[in-house]
Amino acid sequence: MATNSTKGGEFLIKETPAQDIFIPEQWNEEQLMMKQTCEDFIAQEVIPFLDRIDKQEEGLVTSILDKAGELGILGISVPEEYGGLGADFVTSMLTTEVIGTGHSIAVSLSAHTGIGTLPVLYYGNEEQKKKYVPKLASGEWKACYCLTEPGSGSDANSGKTSAKLSDDGKYYILNGQKMWITNGGFADIFTVFAKIDDDENLSAFIVEKSFGGITLNPEEHKMGIKGSSTRQVFFNDCKVPVENLLSERGNGFKIAVNILNVGRIKLAGASVGGCKAVVSLAAQYSNERQQFGRPISKYGAIRFKLAEQAARTYAAESAVYRASQSMEDAIAELKASGMDDAKAKLKGIEQFAVEAAILKVHASEVLDYVVDEGVQIYGGMGYSAEAPMDRAYRDARINRIFEGTNEINRLLIVDMLLRRGMKGELDLLGPAQAVAAELMSIPDFGEPDETLFAAEKAQIANFKKAVLMVAGAAVQKLMMTLSKEQEILMNIADMGIETYVAESVMLRTEKLVSMRGADACKEQIAMMRVYISRAADIVSLSGRDALNSFAEGDELRMMLMGLRRFTKQQPFNVKEARQMIAQKLIAENRYCF
């Protein structure tokens, strides 16, 4: 496997060699077999029953989860000693991607294996892990996660659910209301967040349905993911044995935040799976649908859509697996230093919390773009509930809200980067000062570098300078009030997101060319260039909006000139590149990259 010594967030200030990243073209035989198992499961146990799943036919979802448990799909990330397969993080991401094509089942399954199982696996003591994890890995017990309340969504720590120690000291008595609880209708195990007495921070509890004192509202009627169980859950003097406190008192908020880091990158992986499935359907329909005497795949307007869908999907996938391997490398390093498996996984993933937030935002928005254009390619049939785009469109929309809204995640990206800079974990100040000095200097018009992808590398290095320039100026100018300037923070976040993804797609393509040769990678090179061209426009627009919001006079003019320099593009026939990508998709009749 690749090794990547880059720390989380360091992509902004450090160049990553292409050979250091993992790319999806490197899967080994065992990983591809696991992928095939998941594909067969979705094809045989899910897709034929989508209408019945959406109608929430009694017992159907739980029976499908039982089958997933029999195949080992629910225990992919669980160590072998607790009844799982013990797969590494990158492999678990591959299976997450495939399961992401399963619509409502993807939600039920990922809620069980992610936020349902991981709090116990990562934070439980040995006794708790031995009692609960094997039954969760096999699917004998189903799990859910109770964090959100009517008055606390994005502000999770403001929850009002209370826990009081009983007079005999044997139980915590839980009282409160939770809402939007995925798998709530059939879960056996609830991870519940509540405040003990007047604590400032939440604590977490493992609650069995059999403890009693739990009541459920009817199923929520939702825009999409209709087949997933979503209930309000009420705790009325629910008696939880003291030994079912998860981790330490007051550690619940930390548990919630760290489990969300895992959930964010997993959601990005599932979104990539959804994108690929929709692009395949769109390509097939464009070949079948005849208008004016020829398939609509012959028309430039349709080819534009197919090529953009593919290029954005390819870029998102590149970034997802780059970050996944970075996390896996960090986990391996921590384990090698003597840290136990669960702590190493948490710490390794937490190191790349910035990238997890970037990918959650990016991939969920790519999926929304892909399904929207999928509806458009299908035309009138796209709007019909008889065709597959209706469900894909509705089901995709939740991903921009799940695991922290995209707005919250954008704010987090910048906040985490700046905090790491202030703590000295990331040297942002030095590179930011270097960019400020460069603005005052005469541009270097040296001999152009003719090596492969030299232009793209220079372009991405300039994107990083643009981010550092705008963020550095914003910090300097606004200082303590920057945290309240959400529009500016979101502009900076968008610059950072596009920079990370553009670099990821470039590194993947560079590595792929080194493995296969440029002639075998013409479409991938085209997708990379299409993506980077659009990224340059977003970095430019977001940077301009941010600068115009806080700078003025000569300083503003100088930075706008710098921004133009940092987002300058060489002439590039994007239409021709899109035609090449679309022709490959049309010939293969599926997403084939």
Image (tube, rainbow, N blue to C red):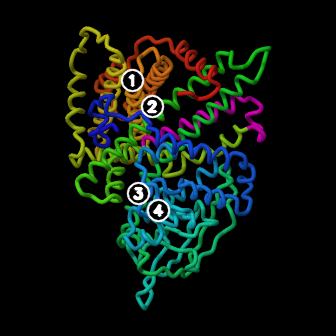
Nearest the eye: 263 or 540: 263
Residue 90, by quadrant, is: top left
Real-space Cα distance between discs 3 and 2? 32 Å
| Numbered disc in front, either 3 or 4 | 4
Q: Would you place residue 323 above or below residue 246 in this image?
A: above
Nearest the eye: 25 or 100: 25
Q: Would you place residue 228 above or below residue 265 in this image?
A: below
User: Which residue type does callout 2 highlight?
Assistant: Glu
Q: In the image, what residue occupies the spot 36% across and 43% down? A: 414
| Numbered disc in front, either 3 or 2 | 2
Question: What secondary structure is marked by label 4?
Answer: loop
**Disc 2 target residue:** 25
Q: Which of the two labelled residues, at mark 2 and mark 4, occupies the earlier sequence position?
A: 2
Report the span colored magenta: 358-387
Residue 62, by quadrant, is: bottom right
Q: In the image, what residue occupies the spot 48% across and 53% down? A: 76
Crowding at dot 1, Cα within 10 Å, few <14 / some 14-19 / many 20+, comes out as few
Crowding at dot 4, Cα within 10 Å, few <14 / some 14-19 / many 20+, comes out as some
Real-space Cα distance between discs 4 and 1? 37 Å
**Disc 4 target residue:** 83
Magenta highlight on residue 476 = no
**Disc 3 target residue:** 257
**Disc 1 target residue:** 515
| Residue 453 visible to the viewer | yes
Q: Would you place residue 557 above or below residue 490 in this image?
A: above
Real-space Cα distance between discs 3 and 4? 26 Å
CB-based contact (under 8 Å), mark 2 and mark 1 = yes
Magenta highlight on residue 381 = yes
Residue 42 x %, y %: 63, 46
Q: Which of the two labelled residues, at mark 3 and mark 2, occupies the earlier sequence position?
A: 2
User: Which residue type does callout 4 highlight?
Assistant: Gly
